[in-house]
Image (tube, helix red, strand yellow):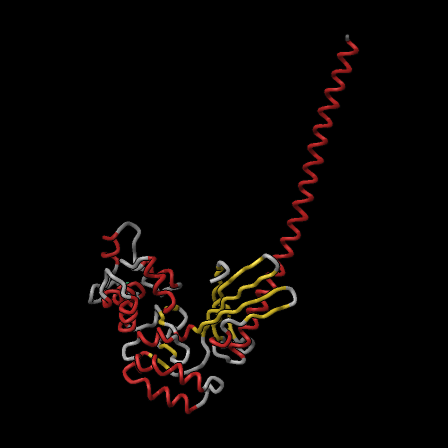
């Protein structure tokens, strides 16, 4: 009885040991498997990073060194050793700058998207009051600290330049949905505020006060001179089209800043990043990457 009890005790302790050992073995197996899976996904991430970097450097070389127009870089699909990279590029010089644009241009943009709830002049005044350093509300319904405070707690104008387009939704009575509509026309990387005619979309040219003729004729002019962008004849022809739009635009074609989206694919993995590339004045660099935003692949 005593002996049997003792055997029973031994058996129980062996059983406990086996369970513990079994548990340990399972844990070790799990950890090993996790480490293997982890190493594979770390390698995958490195390869995607390398594809991304190659795409970015290729786009930078084409835009700033070869000075290819953004529209020729846009849509390029390149097969590299280990995957595929797709490039999308748009010149920031062809967009309306939230910090540099004059009120007439901001008002024209608001009119173009047909946004309700605010007069175009009021939108322009509020954008300018949000970014200017002073606390004096502009005419036409501008807004500074008292108007923001009345709208709710923690509401204030930045009284500093916009750093991102998304910041526009902090401007009094501008909604996130309206920011989404405005976004394709806007930038914060064209600080002198003039729209580069040869870089702008037709939709942007069309909304510029007096820009309808430019919008109608620029596409044909660009197609004719696609390979000779520095061509004087083309510049003269564009100059003649400017008319009343002249105060809002420039014909200069010096590359300044671009948004480049690089989409990298390999196997089932995809990644997309928007980079902002800004021309550099440093002798050893053509451009700087001044912003980087992770995006969902596909657009
Ligand atoms: Ca202000």
Q: Say whether residue 121 is left or right of residue 22.
A: left
Residue 30 coordinates in the image, percent (x, y): 67, 40
Residue 212 coordinates in the image, percent (x, y): 30, 79
Residue 135 coordinates in the image, percent (x, y): 25, 62
| Looking at the image, residue 130 lies above or below residue 228 | above
Q: Residue furthest top?
A: 1
How many dots with numbers?
A: 0
Q: Residue furthest right?
A: 3
Q: Locate residue 129: give its quadrant.
A: bottom left
Q: Say whether residue 14 is left or right of residue 288.
A: right
Give the residue drawn at x 48%, y 64%: 274
| Looking at the image, residue 294 lies above or below residue 99 | above
Give the residue drawn at x 49%, y 77%: 72
Q: Say whether residue 223 is left or right of residue 207.
A: right
Q: Nearer the viewer, residue 39 or 128?
A: 39
Residue 248 coordinates in the image, percent (x, y): 32, 78
Q: Locate residue 136: give its quadrant.
A: bottom left
Location of the N terminus (image quadrant): top right
| Looking at the image, residue 95 lies above or below residue 172 | below
Give the residue drawn at x 53%, y 64%: 263
Q: Nearer the viewer, residue 53 or 296?
A: 296
Q: Residue furthest left?
A: 140
């Amino acid at each position: 009885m005593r002996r049997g009890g003792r055997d029973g005790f031994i058996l129980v302790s062996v059983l406990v040991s086996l369970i513990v050992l079994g548990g340990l073995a399972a844990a070790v197996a799990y950890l090993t498997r996790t480490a293997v899976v982890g190493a594979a996904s770390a390698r995958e991430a490195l390869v995607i990073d390398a594809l991304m970097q190659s795409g970015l450097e290729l786009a930078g070389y084409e835009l700033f060194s070869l000075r290819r127009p953004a529209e020729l870089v846009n849509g390029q699909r390149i097969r590299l050793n280990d995957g595929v990279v797709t490039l999308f590029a748009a010149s920031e010089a062809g967009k309306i700058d939230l910090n540099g644009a004059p009120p007439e241009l901001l008002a024209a943009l608001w009119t173009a998207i047909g946004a309700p709830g605010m007069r175009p002049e009021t939108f322009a005044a509020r954008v300018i009051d949000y970014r200017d350093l002073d606390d004096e509300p502009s005419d036409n319904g501008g807004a500074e600290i008292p108007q923001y405070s009345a709208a709710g707690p923690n509401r204030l104008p930045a009284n500093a330049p916009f750093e991102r387009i998304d910041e526009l939704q902090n401007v009094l009575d501008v909604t996130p949905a309206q920011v989404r509509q405005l976004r394709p026309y806007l930038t914060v990387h064209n600080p002198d505020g003039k729209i580069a005619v040869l870089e702008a979309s037709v939709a942007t040219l069309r909304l510029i006060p007096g820009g309808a003729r430019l919008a109608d004729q620029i596409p044909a002019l660009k197609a004719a001179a696609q390979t000779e962008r520095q061509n004087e004849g083309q510049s003269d022809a564009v100059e003649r089209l400017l008319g009343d739009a002249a105060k809002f635009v420039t014909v200069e074609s010096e590359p300044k800043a671009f948004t480049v989206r690089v989409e990298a694919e390999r196997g089932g993995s995809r990644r997309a990043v928007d980079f902002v590339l800004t021309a550099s004045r440093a002798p050893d660099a053509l451009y700087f990457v001044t912003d980087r935003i992770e995006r969902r692949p596909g657009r």
